[in-house]
Image: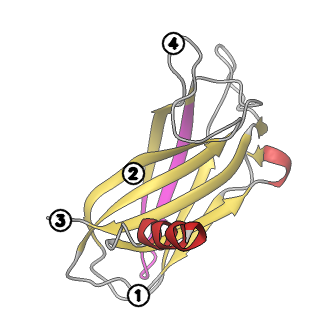
Amino acid sequence: MRNSLFILFFLGFLSCNSNLVFSEYLSMKDGKWGMDRPADFKISGLDTTQTYNLYINIRNDDAYQFSNLFLIAELEDPNGKTWKDTLEYRMAEPTGKWLGKGLGSIKENKLWFKEKTVFPDSGVYTLSIAHAMRKNGNVEGIQVLHGITDVGLEIEKSNQ
């Protein structure tokens, strides 16, 4: 009986977000994200008349040394046109307490990327996400960012 309740709860939990149309995570080997190794996502099969909300998901552990995260996101449409954004997200409170959800040392942050976005052309879109972290006062970026375990992308239908 107890196992049946758990299975029903788990299945109900999985079906909570019926608006989700794309979800993918890329694991960063040993929690190390190289500046020259962007997370690339191929997106296809989206309804050209629908609006979507896009989220970047970041999983970090205690090896992450910063309270924020700078990203460069580059979205290329099927025709080769590219949009590039530089993004900054808070990862911790001023007290040092991690933001995000999760038990133990891994925290997951679901970060707004684009709201009510239309993908007007059929075909494959490519989203490339690279970190753009550097230490204060340094011109050169951090080549290998420690503590980022996974980078993900979620796309949900917006409720317009």
Give how far across and how far down residue 23 sits, in percent. Answer: 51, 69
Q: Amino acid at mark 1?
A: Gly
Q: Quadrant of residue 77?
A: bottom left
- Residue at position x 58%, y 47% from top? 58
Q: Quadrant of residue 28?
A: bottom right
**Left or right of 104 on screen, residue 125:** left
Secondary structure, mark 1, is loop
Above or below: residue 143 compared with residue 117: above
Above or below: residue 117 compared with residue 48: above
CB atoms of marks 1 and 4 within 8 Å: no
- Residue at position x 71%, y 30% from top? 64
CB atoms of marks 2 and 1 within 8 Å: no
Please name the residue that numbered disc 3 is placed on.
159
Neighbor class of circle 1 (other Cα within 10 Å; few <14, some 14-19, many 20+) is few
Secondary structure, mark 3, is loop
Instruction: Give the prevailing secondary structure in the magenta stretch.
Output: strand
Give how far across and how far down residue 7 sits, in percent. Answer: 54, 72
CB atoms of marks 1 and 3 within 8 Å: no
Give how far across and how far down residue 102 sits, in percent. Answer: 59, 42
Instruction: Residue 45: give its label.
Output: 1
- Sequence-first tag of 3 and 2: 2
Please name the residue that numbered disc 4 is placed on.
94
Residue sitting farthest toward the right: 30
Secondary structure, mark 2, is strand
